[in-house]
Image (cartoon, helix red, strand yellow):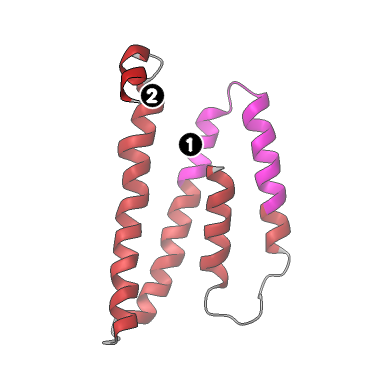
């Protein structure tokens, strides 16, 4: 679900600000990518490092695209501009922060300390 959700976020930031979809083929490509990725994740025991790299790259691309939108509102002094800037920084710090500080350590340490993670969950 992390890959599928990131594909939805990526679609939104790529198509933001347009009344008509500029890339009508993009949902199909993202859907095929998500389906193939899900199958590979469950079939191959060696796929996890690739998953981490691909998910991290997707998150960085989402942040980059969101930053492009942030630049449109950077100089604007309206309420919408302030909200756009604040939400960008919350997302740009929170999304990778949660991934790096919570999810990755849990998955890396869980096999080493299963009793600890049973208590924490």
Tell me the magenta residue range.
31-56
Read off the residue under disc 1.
Answer: 52
Read off the residue under disc 2.
Answer: 108
Element class at badge 1:
helix
Q: CA distance from mark 2 to mark 1?
A: 11 Å
Please tell me whether residue 119 is drawn above or below residue 72 in the rendered image. above
Is residue 16 toward the left or the right of residue 60 in the image?
Answer: right
Mark identifier at residue 96:
none
Element class at badge 2:
helix
Q: Badge 1, how many Cα within 10 Å: few under 14, some, many 20+?
A: few
Q: Badge 2, how many Cα within 10 Å: few under 14, some, many 20+?
A: few
Magenta-drawn stretch contains 7: no
Please tell me whether residue 52 is drawn above or below residue 64 in the rendered image. above
Horizontal and vertical percent for residue 82?
28, 78
Is mark 2 in CB contact (under 8 Å) with mark 1?
Answer: no
Tell me which residue sits at (59%, 48%) in the image. Answer: 4
Horizontal and vertical percent for residue 9?
52, 59
Q: Please report whichever mark, 2 or 1, sits nearer to the chain's N-terminal start.
A: 1
Magenta-drawn stretch contains 32: yes
On-image quarter of the C terminus: top left
């Amino acid at each position: 679900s992390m890959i599928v959700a990131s594909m939805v976020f990526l679609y939104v930031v790529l198509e933001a600000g347009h009344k008509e979809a500029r890339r009508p083929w993009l949902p199909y490509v993202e859907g095929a990518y998500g389906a193939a990725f899900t199958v590979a994740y469950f079939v191959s025991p060696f796929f996890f490092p690739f998953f981490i790299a691909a998910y991290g790259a997707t998150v960085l691309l989402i942040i980059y695209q969101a930053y492009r939108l942030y630049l449109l509102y950077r100089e604007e002094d309206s309420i919408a501009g302030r909200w756009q800037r604040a939400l960008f920084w919350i997302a740009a710090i929170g999304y990778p922060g949660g991934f790096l500080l919570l999810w990755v350590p849990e998955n890396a340490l869980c096999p080493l300390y299963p009793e600890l993670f049973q208590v924490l969950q």
